[in-house]
C-alpha cells in the first residue's frame, strides 16, 4: 500500500529534523501539516513552498505545544491525521541542583506531555480511517544518559515508555507506534548547545563537536535530517506493518558502546 494521499501532522516542523521529515513525507506524496509556536508569514510560506514543490497539500498550523490544549487543538484543526510525528523538542543544559524549574517544566511539557495530548486526539482519527502510524522522535538520550540533561533525558525516556504503551493499546489494529532515537544531528537545537558546552568544558567549537558531541558517536559523523525523514517513511511502509513498540537508533553506533 502506498502512503500517497495520507495526511501527516509533524510537530515542531518549521526547522531541523521536523522539517526534514516533512520534506521526505511530502516527497512520498503525503499531505503535510507543519507546526511550531510562531505564526509568521515565513512559516506559512514554507508550507506553501513544500506543497508546490511536491504536489501535495501542505498547511502550517500554529500551536504552542507547552500547552496541552494547544497540542490537542493542533490535531483537531488538522482534521485528519494518518501519520503523527511527535518531533517538537527543546533542550537546556545545567547540573540538576542548579536546573531552573521553569526549564524543567517546559522540557517535560514540550518534549513529553505534548506527545500524550496529540496521540490522544489522533488515535480515534486513525481508528476511523482504518490505518495509522505514530512516530515519536525520542533520542539516544531516551535510551542512555549524559550529565546536565536531567529534564531532557527524563522526557525522552518517558517518550520511549509511552511509545510502548501506545503500541500495546493498538497492537491488534492496523496502527503502529515506534520511537526513533537519533544521535547528534546538526540542527539549530544542537547549534544552540555548542556555546554552553564550550563554556562548561572550556573548549573551542571544533573540540566540542569532535571531543564532546561526536565523541560518543562512533561513526564520527552527524546523522542527517534526510536520513531521519527516510526512517519515518520506512515506518509508514508495509514492510514495517509488524514493527511496533520499539525504538530505531540512528546514532552512528552510540548505543552500541
Ligand atoms: P530544532 O530546534 O531545529 O527544532 C525543534 C522544533 O520544535 C522547531 O520547529 C521548534 O520551533 C519547535 N518547537 C520548540 N518549542 C515548541 C513549542 N513550544 N511548540 C511548538 N513547537 C515548538 O531541533 P531539532 O534538533 O530538529 O530537534 C527535533 C527533535 O529531535 C527534538 O525532539 C529533539 O529532542 C530531537 N533530537 C534531536 C537531536 C539532534 O542532535 N538535533 C538528537 C536527538 C533527538
Image (cartoon, rainbow, N blue to C red):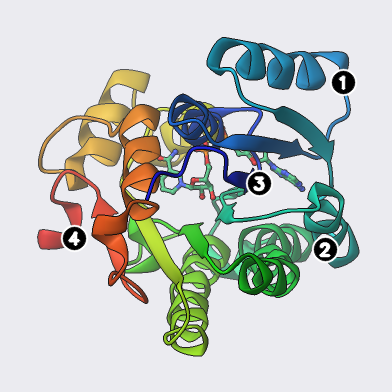
Pointer 2 and pointer 3: residues touching (CB < 8 Å)?
no
Q: Nearer the viewer, mark 4 or mark 1?
A: 1
Cβ of mark 3 under 8 Å from ligand 1: the answer is: yes
Q: Determine the image quadrant of residue 115.
A: bottom right
Ligand 1: does it lie within 8 Å of the C-beta at label 4?
no
Q: Earlier in the sequence, mark 2 or mark 4?
A: 2
Q: Which mark is residue 40?
A: 1
Which residue is the site of mark 3?
A: 11
Estimate how packed mark 2 is, as few (under 14), some (14 to 19) or many (20 or more) residues with alpha carbons within 10 Å: many
Q: State which mark lies toward you, 4 or 3.
A: 3
Badge 4 vs badge 3, beta-carbon distance below 8 Å: no
The CA distance from mark 2 to mark 3 is 12 Å
Quarter residue 49 falls in: top right
Queried on whether the Cβ of the residue with tag 1 lies below 8 angstroms from ligand 1, the answer reads no
Q: Earlier in the sequence, mark 1 or mark 2?
A: 1
The disc at residue 255 is 4
Q: Mark 1: which secondary structure? A: loop
Give x and y (percent) for residue 18: 55, 37
Amino acid at each position: 500500500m502506498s502512503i500517497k494521499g495520507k495526511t501527516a501532522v509533524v510537530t515542531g516542523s518549521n526547522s531541523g529534523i521536523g522539517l526534514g521529515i516533512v520534506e521526505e513525507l511530502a516527497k512520498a506524496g503525503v499531505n503535510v501539516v507543519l507546526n511550531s509556536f510562531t505564526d509568521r508569514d515565513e512559516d506559512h510560506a514554507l508550507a506553501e513552498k513544500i506543497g508546490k514543490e511536491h504536489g501535495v497539500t501542505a498547511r502550517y498550523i500554529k500551536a504552542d505545544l507547552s500547552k496541552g490544549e494547544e497540542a490537542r487543538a493542533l490535531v483537531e484543526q488538522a482534521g485528519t491525521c494518518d501519520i503523527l510525528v511527535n518531533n517538537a523538542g527543546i533542550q537546556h543544559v545545567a547540573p540538576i541542583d542548579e536546573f531552573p524549574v521553569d526549564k524543567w517544566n517546559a522540557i517535560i511539557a514540550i518534549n513529553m506531555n505534548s506527545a500524550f495530548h496529540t496521540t490522544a486526539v489522533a488515535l480515534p482519527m486513525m481508528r476511523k480511517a482504518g490505518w495509522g502510524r505514530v512516530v515519536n522522535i525520542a533520542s539516544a538520550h531516551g535510551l542512555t544518559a549524559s550529565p546536565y540533561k536531567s529534564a531532557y533525558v527524563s522526557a525522552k525516556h518517558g517518550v520511549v515508555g509511552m511509545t510502548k504503551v501506545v503500541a500495546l493499546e493498538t497492537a491488534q489494529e492496523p496502527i503502529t507506534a515506534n520511537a526513533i532515537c537519533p544521535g547528534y544531528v546538526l540542527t539549530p537545537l544542537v547549534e544552540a548547545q555548542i556555546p554552553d558546552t564550550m563554556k562548561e568544558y572550556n573548549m573551542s567549537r571544533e573540540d566540542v563537536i569532535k571531543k564532546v558531541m561526536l565523541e560518543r558517536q562512533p561513526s564520527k559523523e552527524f546523522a542527517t535530517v534526510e536520513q531521519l525523514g527516510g526512517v519515518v517513511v520506512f515506518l509508514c511502509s508495509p514492510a514495517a506493518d509488524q514493527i511496533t513498540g520499539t525504538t530505531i537508533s540512528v546514532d552512528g553506533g552510540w548505543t552500541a558502546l
